[in-house]
Structures are given as structure tokens and as C-alpha cells.
Amino acid sequence: MSFVAVFGITFALNQAYLKQAAATQTVAVAKKDLLPGTPLNADSLIMIEKPVFGLNNDYVADISELIARGPWYIGEVGLGAGDILRPRRLTSAGSAGGDWRWEFSNREDVCLIAVATDLVRSGGDWLWPGMRADAVVYIPAQNGYEESLPSQIIGPEEDPLLANLLVVDKKNAGGLALAEGWTGDGYSRDLLPAVVTLMVDKEDKERIKALIRYNEEGRIYFSPRSGQANGE
């Protein structure tokens, strides 16, 4: 009798396990590789049916509802094409420093300025929306008939206008946002980010003029400020 009872319990458990393993749920997954800091939008996601087993309630079943609660940014781990969108791997706009497009369009006291740079040799991929960075300028030597000037390196110590700049966007040489240039096999050198957009107080005209002058006379490099993991 006990054997029959044990068999019955085992059979029931196996059936429950098989039923759970066979159950599916339509969830949001990444349509393409999404790098850390990338703004999340509906166009970068698709709905795919996945086994319920292993989802652990950490999934998105309604893209429009998630987007409505945003804006969101991809967290520091990033997402690969086909990865299930886990809410715990997203960062809210408040945590990421704000939704800069919304903030810019709703403020009258700021302006944007795009600065050409070489992120291969300066900030690399460590510049993202909401980050503060210092700029360092290299002005090459100038040789003239009457006077020759040596090369110069100017940082925040020499010019405070280069300190504490707010980064709100970055694009590659073709004007595409960083995530849009991703191919899945890595960036070619031509697709590496080359333009950083800064948000500056509209009244800070001297800073705007300085950045334009330095961009015309030399090359600007960015050094991300440390201690920003907690929004500092």
C-alpha cells in the first residue's frame, strides 16, 4: 500500500514538473545588442515565447506598459541580442541622471554643444549620459616665419571652464548614437564614438566659447570623474 502511495506522489510531482517545464510565456527580449547606458525604447525589443521555467517572474510581458513607466536605461551589465529583458538589469532615468532629451526640451536655461573628440585615446566607452567629466586640450605646435609656438596641454587647472562638464549623449563619426552603430561583432575603428554632446547653462557663454575655440585650435579629450557610481 505504501508503495502505491509513494508511486502516486512521485507520479503527481513528475506531472507537475513536466507541466511547468512545458508552460510558456511571451516575454520581451533584446532585438539587438544594447550597451550599458543605452536609452531603452520599444523599437529595440521584440516579443518571443519562452519557457516559464527559469523566468522567476523577472521578465516583461507588456512592452508598452514598461515604456510608459520609464524612461529607462540599460544597466551596467548590458544586453545581448536575444537576451530576455530583466527589469533588474534596467536603470531608471532618475538613477541614470535623468532623461536628458526631456529635460532639454522642458528647460529654457540650458543649451547643447557637441564636441569632437577621440574616445579611443581618452574616455573610451566610460562616458555615458549623466556622467560628469573634465576636459583636457592638446594644441599642437605652430611653426611660423616670425614666431614658433610650442605645443600646449591645457586642463582644468589652467582653465576652470574645462572642469565638471555634463555629458548627455555621444555619437560616432557618422552621427549615429553609440548603440545604433553596434554590429554584434564589435566596433570597427570607423564606428567608434567621436562626438560628445554636453549640456551647458545658457548663461555660461564663456564656457561655450572656450569649448568651441579649443575644438577649432586643437583636440579635446575627456577624463570621466570618479565617484559617480552613486550619482555623485
Image: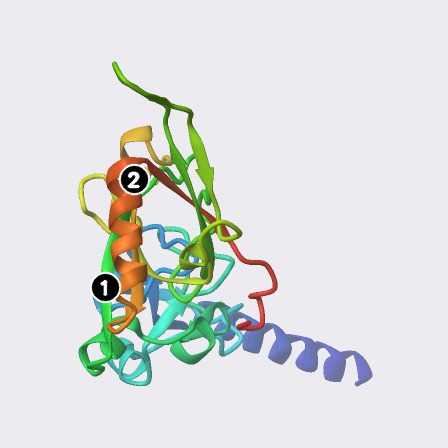
Inspect the image, locate mark 2, and give the three-letter code of the amino acid beneath it: Thr
Q: Residue at x 24, y 49 (%)?
A: 212
Whether residue 121 appears in this view of the structure is: no
The dot on residue 47 is none
Q: Most extreme residue toward the top, as rendered?
A: 145
**Image quadrant for the N terminus?**
bottom right
Q: Residue at x 30, y 51 (%)?
A: 211
Q: Left or right: 23 with respect to 202?
A: right
Residue indicated by mark 2: 183
Q: For this rendering, which residue is in front, 62 or 149?
A: 149
What is the CA distance from the residue labelled 1 to the residue labelled 2?
28 Å
Whether residue 221 appears in this view of the structure is: yes
Q: Is residue 140 above or below residue 176?
A: above
Q: Is residue 202 above or below residue 179?
A: below
Q: Most extreme residue toward the right, as rendered?
A: 2
Q: For this rendering, which residue is in front, 111 or 174?
A: 111
How many residues crowd around disc 2 within 10 Å: few (fewer than 14), some, or many (20 or more)? Answer: few
Q: Secondary structure at mark 2?
A: loop
Q: Residue at x 36, y 37 (%)?
A: 118
Residue indicated by mark 1: 112
Inspect the image, locate mark 1, and give the three-letter code of the amino acid beneath it: Leu
Q: Secondary structure at mark 1?
A: strand
